[in-house]
Amino acid sequence: MKRALVMTDQHYGAGRRGARYKAHPRSIKPGQLFWPLEGRRRRLFEVRDVRGPWVRIKREDGTAGRVTLVRLLSLGPGGRDGRYYRFHGWRSRRRGYRTALEVLGVQPGSDRCVIRLPEWDPDGQVEQPLSVLPAELRHDGALGSCMADLAAETAARLNIHACRTSPAAEGATVMAALPQAIRASPPASSTSARA
């Protein structure tokens, strides 16, 4: 008789896929991976689409479902980790994700620049060839966007390309509209479907 392998928090807690930024995201975008911290159907899932207050998901066992955006964005007591879901990074995509880019420095007399991708690692610095940036972004403090594989574990695997001056699209967020007291506490009634 075969026994099914049941993954627990212990299995998924140590190793996350991609994103070195371990704190809970402030916005929800397709491709993000989460692990439910409670409920019967505790399987790693990927965000597929955000429609109003609902987030469509696909679990790793292939089943589909939905969770509420407010519940997915709710923060725990420390304000760093999710209350109901743990962020696990991003699903790897061949072309990557459109993400925000900040130019930290352009080395004079060199063909190198240092950039930061806040969604990948807000404290990290990534050195790139200057030719990856359009002329409008080739100065310190410039803001724009690029395509990058946010599931990469190292800067060398980010595959940064298609940089432009237009900002990256913001993900779905309700955090700015919610008072701090609501963000840090559980909802009054649980009407959402659990993952």
Image: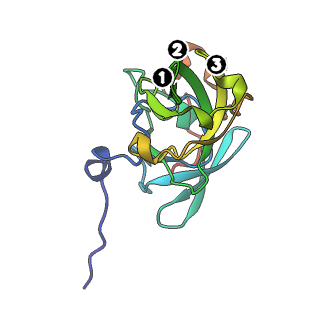
Residue 173 in view: no
Spatial CA span between label 3 and label 2: 35 Å
Q: Which residue is labeled 3 in the image?
A: 142
Q: Is residue 5 above or below residue 115?
A: below
Q: Are marks 1 and 2 in contact (CB under 8 Å)?
A: yes
- Badge 1 or badge 3: first in the primary sequence: 3
- Badge 3 or badge 2: first in the primary sequence: 3
Image coordinates for residue 99, horizontal then vertical, percent? 61, 36
Amino acid on which the number 1 mark rests in the picture: Ser
Q: Is residue 1 above or below residue 75?
A: below
Q: Which residue is labeled 2 in the image?
A: 181
Badge number at residue 155: none
Which label sits in the foreground, 3 or 2? 3
Residue farthest along the bottom direction in this orientation: 1
Badge number at residue 185: 1
Amino acid on which the number 2 mark rests in the picture: Ala
Q: Seen in the image, is 190 located left or right of residue 80? A: right
